[in-house]
Image (cartoon, coloured by chain):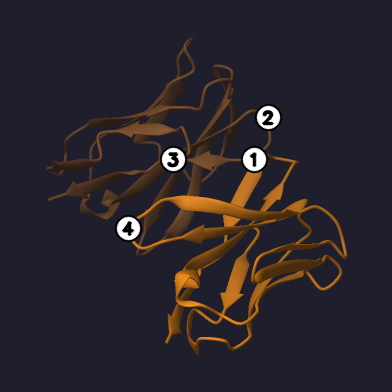
């Protein structure tokens, strides 16, 4: 158990809808990273927050957004969902600003129908 | 954009044999990471390699880094079934705070 929690574990929704994925980092970790894993795109870095501030952006679509709250949990919002957004979404946390030592959550599997 | 390629993509090997997974990246990076992913599971960090010539070993796995060749290797010694998993390498660039994964190598160890 990495100490990183993600909810929900599974999510099934329809195209055009909006969903929110939640991540709670390990106790004391200030950084949260979001990743997408799909058969088409492989593993992709989406975005990183450090202590409430956006620190880095990867291949995140404009339809997606994220934030980190004062209690350090993070939410990834996906809107206007398309079939191609079906994927496993992982978050990871680390104590540092860089990804030197990341601990990954169990993931949320999103299925868009 | 930095590209990270692994080969082979699929590897089936017998127990007790040795093999190497290769990870090539296209431009200068700051660090090289190796992760393991079991089917249906999350990622587990294996190694972080910081500089040219770095070598790290744990159990039957040994990772090395050659920054001049932009190449990292993950060597498996005397494979056992428990090592069956998908292995990913990844690189980061501190400038721009970007993080890139390789394509992954699916390893199956056959008794």
Discs 2 and 1 carry the same chain letter: yes
Q: Is residue B25 above or below residue A88?
A: below
Mark 2 = which residue? Answer: A96
Discs 3 and 4 carry the same chain letter: no
Q: Secondary structure at mark 1?
A: loop
Mark 4 = which residue? Answer: B40
Within-10-Å neighbours for mark 1: few <14, some 14–19, many 20+:
many
Discs 3 and 1 carry the same chain letter: yes
Chain A colour?
Answer: brown
* Quarter of the figure that contains the C terminus of chain B: bottom left
Chain B colour?
Answer: orange
Distance from the alpha carbon under mark 2 to that under mark 4: 28 Å
Q: Chain of mark 3?
A: A
Mark 3 = which residue? Answer: A1
Discs 3 and 2 carry the same chain letter: yes
Q: Chain of mark 2?
A: A
Please identify, in this view, whether the residue under mark 2 or under mark 4 is nearer the observer. Answer: 4
Distance from the alpha carbon under mark 3 to that under mark 1: 19 Å
Please identify, in this view, whether the residue under mark 1 or under mark 4 is nearer the observer. Answer: 4
| Residue depicted at 65% across the width and 79% down the height | B77
Distance from the alpha carbon under mark 2 to that under mark 1: 7 Å
Q: Chain of mark 1?
A: A
């Amino acid at each position: 158990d990495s100490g990183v929690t993600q909810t929900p574990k599974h999510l099934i929704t329809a195209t055009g809808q909006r969903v929110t994925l939640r991540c709670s980092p390990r106790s004391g970790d200030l950084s949260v990273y979001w990743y997408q894993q799909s058969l088409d795109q492989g593993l992709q870095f989406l975005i990183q927050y450090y202590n409430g501030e956006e620190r880095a952006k990867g291949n995140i679509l404009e339809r997606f957004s994220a934030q980190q709250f004062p209690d350090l949990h993070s939410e990834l919002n996906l809107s206007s969902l398309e079939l191609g957004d079906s994927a496993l979404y992982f978050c990871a946390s680390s104590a540092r600003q860089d990804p030197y030592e990341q601990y990954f959550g169990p993931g949320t599997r999103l299925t868009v129908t | 954009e930095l590209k990270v390629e692994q080969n082979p993509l699929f590897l089936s090997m017998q127990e007790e044999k040795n093999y190497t997974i290769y990870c090539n990246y296209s431009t200068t990076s700051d660090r090289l990471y190796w992760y393991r992913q079991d089917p249906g599971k999350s990622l587990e960090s294996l190694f972080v390699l910081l500089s040219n010539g770095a070598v790290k070993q744990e159990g039957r796995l040994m990772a090395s880094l050659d920054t001049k060749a932009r190449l990292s290797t993950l060597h498996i010694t005397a494979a056992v079934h428990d090592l069956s998993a998908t292995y990913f390498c990844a690189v980061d660039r501190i400038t721009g705070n970007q993080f890139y994964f390789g394509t992954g190598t699916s390893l199956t160890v056959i008794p």
